[in-house]
């Protein structure tokens, strides 16, 4: 199955100059191609997907608060604003987050309010002191930072065989001087209008549903051994209902992305078809290439030279 290329037209709704966007897409294509051809990539992609599944396993905070295509970018925006070190920076505020999320067409102001409320309830965001009493500044808690750095560290460590600087970056994720440019670099594609479904429309079946991407990661990981995953297993792992999983798998099967295995139970299970494996490999190559660029930016900020090749 030939996957569609990511074109500039798919991201022309955002305020980025055409030349800069074209350069970004060309860079993404080159770096991704290098990774896909690397002998260690298949094992790296599966290891990274497995580490993601472990990080998200049974964690309702991740699967229900931070894990959909809009909220992933929203959490990066929150991190970027929180980490800003420039003098006079306004930092993270609800108004600023709403304005930027709306401008980037990530989600509505109401969704931002709901996500912030959930994050405060779960101890991920707190009110922060500010000399300007008119400004209601927020701060991310160590718990929120740890959720992200743990995930990135696991992926960078999994990437080590295919990316020389990955292991070096993994040890610096607790350094704000490293983390600020790292996060800002990760945000660049989202600011350019990139979305999972812009490049891989077949994954919309998963990306538009709560816990959907984690279902896709679990199926991708299980494809290594040709293991069929039951509906009950996927529902338990991603903390979503069985009916939600069954509907997702039904639509994915109709699209040729999964094969249902009715012999496991009355609900049946599912195996990833080659089309889903290929799409997930492309998604993992994109994610790993971005992590590599983000690591290089972070290493440069703390005065460490990055390697020249992926």
Image (cartoon, rainbow, N blue to C red):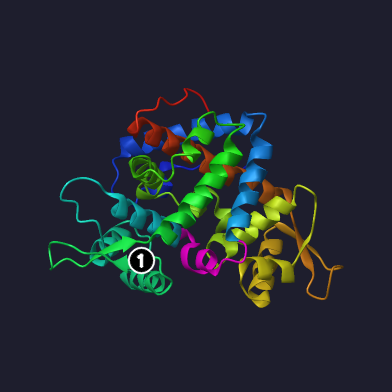
Q: Position of residue 45 (x, y in %)?
A: 63, 42
The residue that appears at 31% across and 50% down in the rendered structure is 83
Residue 149, image x, y percentages: 47, 50
Q: Is residue 64 above or below residue 255?
A: below
Dot 1: within a 10 Å radius of its alpha carbon, few (fewer than 14), some, or many (20 or more) residues?
many
Front one among 155 and 143: 143
Residue 78 quadrant: bottom left
Image coordinates of residue 178 in percent, x first then y, are 37, 40
Q: Residue furthest top?
A: 308
In the displayed structure, does residue 73 sit left or right of residue 160? left
In the depicted structure, whether residue 121 falls above or below residue 218: below
> In the visual, does 259 lie left or right of 149?
right
Q: Height in image: 121 above or below 173?
A: below
Q: Nearer the viewer, residue 179 or 3?
A: 179
Horizontal relation, residue 235 to residue 285: left or right: right
Residue 40 at least partly seen: yes
Instruction: Kindly identify the residue that appears in the image at 24 percent across and 61 percent down.
Output: 96
The structure residue drawn at horizontal position 72% and vertical position 48%, both measured from the top left corner, is 274
Regarding mark 1 in the picture, which secondary structure is present there?
A: strand
Count of marks placed on residues = 1
Q: Main secondary structure of the magenta part?
A: helix
The magenta stretch is: 57-70
Toward the viewer: 288 or 4? 288
**Viewer-proximal residue among 180 and 123:** 123
Give the residue drawn at x 30%, y 55%. 82
Whether 215 is among the magenta residues is: no
Name the residue beneath numbered marker 1. Answer: 125
Q: Is residue 4 visible?
A: no
Q: Report the residue that reaches farthest toward the right.
A: 263
Locate the N terminus by quadrant: top right
């Amino acid at each position: 199955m030939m996957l569609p290329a990511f074109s500039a037209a798919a991201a022309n709704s955002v305020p980025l100059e055409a030349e800069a966007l074209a350069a970004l897409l060309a860079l993404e294509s080159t770096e991704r191609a290098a990774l896909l051809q690397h002998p260690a990539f298949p094992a790296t992609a599966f290891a990274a997907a497995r580490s993601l599944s472990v990080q998200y396993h049974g964690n309702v905070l991740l699967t229900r608060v931070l894990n959909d295509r809009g909220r992933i970018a929203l959490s990066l925006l929150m991190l970027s604003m929180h980490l800003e070190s420039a003098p006079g920076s306004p930092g993270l505020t609800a108004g600023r987050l709403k304005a930027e999320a709306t401008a980037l067409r990530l989600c509505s102001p109401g969704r931002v309010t709901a996500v912030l409320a959930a994050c405060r309830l779960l101890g991920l965001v707190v009110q922060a002191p500010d000399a300007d009493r008119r400004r209601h500044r927020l701060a991310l808690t160590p718990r929120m930072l740890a959720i992200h750095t743990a995930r990135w560290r696991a992926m960078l460590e999994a990437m080590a065989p295919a990316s020389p600087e990955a292991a070096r970056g993994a040890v610096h994720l607790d350094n704000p001087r490293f983390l600020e440019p790292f996060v800002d670099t990760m945000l660049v594609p989202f600011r350019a209008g990139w979305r999972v479904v812009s490049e891989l429309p077949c994954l919309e079946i998963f990306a538009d549903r709560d816990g959907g991407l984690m279902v896709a990661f679990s199926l991708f990981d299980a494809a290594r051994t040709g293991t069929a995953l039951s509906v009950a297993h996927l529902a338990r792992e991603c903390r979503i209902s069985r009916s939600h999983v069954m509907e997702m798998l039904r639509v994915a099967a109709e699209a040729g992305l999964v094969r249902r295995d009715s012999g496991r139970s009355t609900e049946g299970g599912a195996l990833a078809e080659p089309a889903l494996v290929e799409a997930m490999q492309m998604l993992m190559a994109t994610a790993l290439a971005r992590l590599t660029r983000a690591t290089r930016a972070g290493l440069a900020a703390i005065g460490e030279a990055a390697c020249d090749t992926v």
